[in-house]
Structure formats: C-alpha cells, structure tokens
Image: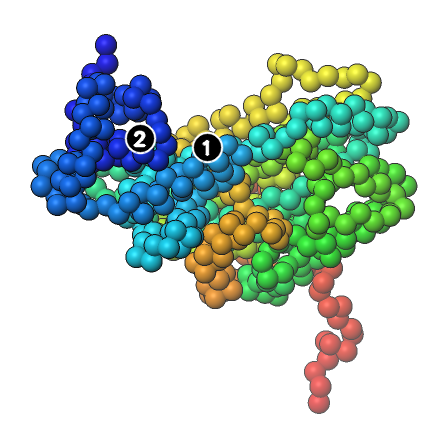
Amino acid sequence: MSKKTTLTLSDKIKLIELKQHENLSVKELMVKFKCGKTQVYEAIKNKDKLMEQWVSCKNSGKSKRVVSVGYEQVERDLYRWFINCRSKSLPISGPIIQTEATKLAEKLGISDFKASNGWLDRFKRRHNIVCKKINGEANDVNQDTVENWKRKLLVLIKGYEAKDIYNADETGLFFRGIPTKSLVIKGDACVGGKKSKDRLTVLMCGSMAGEIRKPLVIGKSMKPRCFKNMNIALLPVTWKSNKKAWMTAEIMEQWLQYFNADMRSQNRNILLFLDNVTCHPYIELSNVKIHMLPPNTTSVSQPMDQGVIYTFKSYYRKFMLQSLVCKIDSSTSVHQLATSITVLDAVNWISLSCNSLKNECVQNCFRKAGFLIDGLDVNPNENALTEIQDIFAALDFDQEQFLHIDDQLETQQTHDSAISMVENESEKDEDNDENQYEEPENMVKDYKTAICYLQELQKFSLTVSNGELLDLISRAKECVERDALQNKKQKSITDFFQKI
C-alpha cells in the first residue's frame, strides 16, 4: 500500500485552484496529490479560510510566499503549451520556455512577471521536466511514405550497377569540440572552459559499392591563416567558404558540376540521391541524374544517415583526441588545448576519417536505407557500426554524448524562429580562428629544412623500434627529395663563371 502525503498549505491552494479551474473530481485530486479523500474534502470545504491563511502567510507550511493567481494561470497555460509541443516531438529549450512564458504573461495583462533563470529552474522542478537528447528524426517519418519510396526505389535503380548509385549529405562538425565530462576526485570542482562552437560543414558522398569520394568542406574563411603559403587546390578536401559555414545552392551547384565533369571523363552515367532541401538545386546534367529523397524521410531513407556519418565522426574524434593527449602536458587550460586545433588539422583529420571508412560499412548503410539490387537483402548479422566498437575502448568518459555533440547543428539556413533564436545566441560566443592562429616559429619553409626534419624522424623511428613508422617516413622523405629535384632551378654553364 502506498504511503499517503500530508498536504501543506501550498498543496491545498493548488488543489483548490485545480478544482475551480479544471473541475477535477475528488478521485482525480486524490491521485494527483497522493492523499486521502478526507484531506481533499476538507480543503474544498475550507477553501475561503485556507485562502485567507495563504495571503496572510500565517500557516507554517513549506512555502509562505504569496503567489499571484495570475502567475498560476501563466504556469498552467505554459505547461499545456509544453505538453502540446512535446506531443509533436518539437525540440524545446530553456530560452524558448522563458520566451513563451513572457508572451503568455503579456497576453494575460501581467506586467510584473519575470521569466528569470531561477523561475525556469523552479518551473522544471515543479513539473518534473528534465533535459534529454533528441535521438534522430524517427517521429517525423511517415511509414507509409517510406514503404512507397522503397518500392519506387527498386524501379529507379534497376539497370544500374552498385558503383553508379550515389548518395550525398551534409553534416555539421564542431571541429574543436572536446569532451565535456571528466572523472574528478569527489569534492573537487570540475571546471573546464567555454565550449568551442567553431564549426565546419562537411558534404560526404558515397556509392552503393562502398566508395567514399573526396569530401567537400565549408568553412567561414576563404583562406584561413593556417593555409598561408599553401595551394588550397592541393588540400585533401574540396574547400569552400561563406560567413556561416553553411551549404548554399551556389556551392552545391559548383560541386555538382565538378562531379558531373569527373563522371563524364570516366564515361559513366550515375544516379545521385539528395535531400529535398532548398540548398540542393535540381539541375540537368549530362552524366549525373539527380533524384530527391521524399521530404521528412531522410532519417531512414538516406544511406549517409544510417551510420556512415556517425562512423566518420567517430574516427574524426579518435584522431583529434590522439593529438590532444600528446599536447596535454604542454597546455595550461582547456581553452588553450581546444584552440591549438587549427582548420588545417581538422581538414587532415576529415580526409583521414573518410579514408578510414570501410567499404562494408557504406554498403550496409545503403542496404539499411532500402537500396537493394536483384533482391539482395540486409544481413541481420551485419552491423554497419561494428567497426568502431573498440575505437574508444581506452577512453573513460561518456563517448555517446561526445559523439553526438553536433548532431543538431544546422548545415543550411532554416526558417524556424525558435531554433534561430538559440542559434543566434550561440553565434556571439563563437571563437574566431582567424584571430587565434599564430604561425609557429619553426615552421618548415623550404625543401632543405623538410629533408633535415625527416632525417631526424627516421632516427627517432629506429630509436623506438617502430618499423611501420620508419617505412612511412622513408617514403615521405623520398617523395620530398623527388619533388625538390623537380622544382630545382636548372643551372647554365655561365653560372660557374665569376662575373668581372
């Protein structure tokens, strides 16, 4: 038998309010307040006396604060609004709740209402509201639409080989995002620093056969300082830029034209499946036929979303953490550690992460999205993400939270006013990579210096008995020497004579 609660004056006032405004039955009130029917009847019978005690604060209950009936109405309306939004799986944040509460108060003519952070905390406690991560977009998906699309898909891809069926999708990346949780001694403060919101947008494109193409990366600067004296065309990614580091129709059209030229040079005709969004223009191309995925189904119908992007980010953060662990002894703060990561570091890790993706992973993700040829079905024993199970085995923190820190990051402009409000607030806190990067004093600026450093690295690899490292460095040294020879200025016979 459950233990019954003894109602305080505050509880009795709430009970009376619910009885008056929502006309709840005695039984419903008993369940809501977990009390006996005697307490309910007594509260209703003595409502005038109880209200007098509440206003004059003569009772010794837990709360003696005079609460405006108008405030109670704001809270009731706000809670109904919150429940309605969550029933539609809409994302709700603290600032959004505070904004809506202020609007409701103004609508009710309450001028002294303040939706402060303290009020927000109390509101969440009173209604048992907690913050949870929204996983995926499954609630937005109409299953009938998905099933119809999968049947149509079998017709669309018929006659094409797996190597000629592609999907491309963008993902946002906090390229300096580091773990926000840490093990500490009990009682010690766990202080980090301002979380870096420096972002890039990465367009990943892969084929049903498992090929991953050179990624397109969009940053905020046309040529970041860390790209100084470099030929951007030789980067391991395709680099584009705009103020917000977002995908735009112009950038996407340029990429599509380049993709089409590549397919034309190979005499290939392919299918390319894209999100049905405004930044993806539908254009007629000679060797690339574009098909748009059905609206609001990309979370289940887009192969890149079935595990390819997740695996890519797993590798990226593995490479990033490996680098940071090597720098941790020489860093004095979290901020210094995070800002030591340059856009050039990120570009190299993005390329390395794409190259680390296995063909089987990409193939399984296409199958999971319904891309089947000749009746081939998904093997229930295969998991597209099994290859990353051991990536973080040696790291002791909440790896899932770390891997998902930028899942909701926008990659294009939207018209959602609520999300825009939160996004605009965070934009003010973003660090400017252009102002923080300093060219190191010992930067290699010529072939002679590069060859000397590589010779030292050869000695180091022998000292630590690492044959794989020695092989890589030896090949790098040979490549640098060959390039130096090709770029060396040819001397003429007159160079050997001294001018008089």
Question: Which residue is rendered at x = 16% and y = 36% of the image?
Answer: 50
Question: Which residue is rendered at x = 45% and y = 35% of the image?
Answer: 83
The amino acid type of the residue labelled 1 equals: Glu
Q: Report the residue marked by disc 2.
A: 19
Q: Report the residue marked by disc 1.
A: 400
Question: Which residue is rendered at x = 71% and y = 49% of the image?
Answer: 278
Q: Nearer the viewer, residue 432 or 15?
A: 15
x and y, in percent, of residue 473 in the image: 58, 45
> Secondary structure beneath disc 1?
helix
Residue 468 in sight from this viewpoint: no
> Secondary structure beneath disc 2?
helix
Q: Give the tally of numbered discs.
A: 2
The amino acid type of the residue labelled 2 equals: Lys
Q: Residues within 10 Å of mark 1 (few under 14, many from 20)?
A: few
Q: Nearer the viewer, residue 102 or 476?
A: 102
The quarter of the image holding the N terminus is top left
Looking at this rendering, what residue extends furthest in the bottom direction? Answer: 500
The quarter of the image holding the C terminus is bottom right
Question: Which residue is rendered at x = 30% and y = 24% of the image?
Answer: 29
x and y, in percent, of residue 192 in the image: 33, 48
x and y, in percent, of residue 36 in the image: 21, 18
Q: Is residue 342 above or below residue 27?
A: below
Give the left or right position of residue 305, taking residue 123 as reference. Answer: right
Disc on the earlier residue, 2 or 1? 2
Looking at this rendering, what residue extends furthest in the top direction? Answer: 1
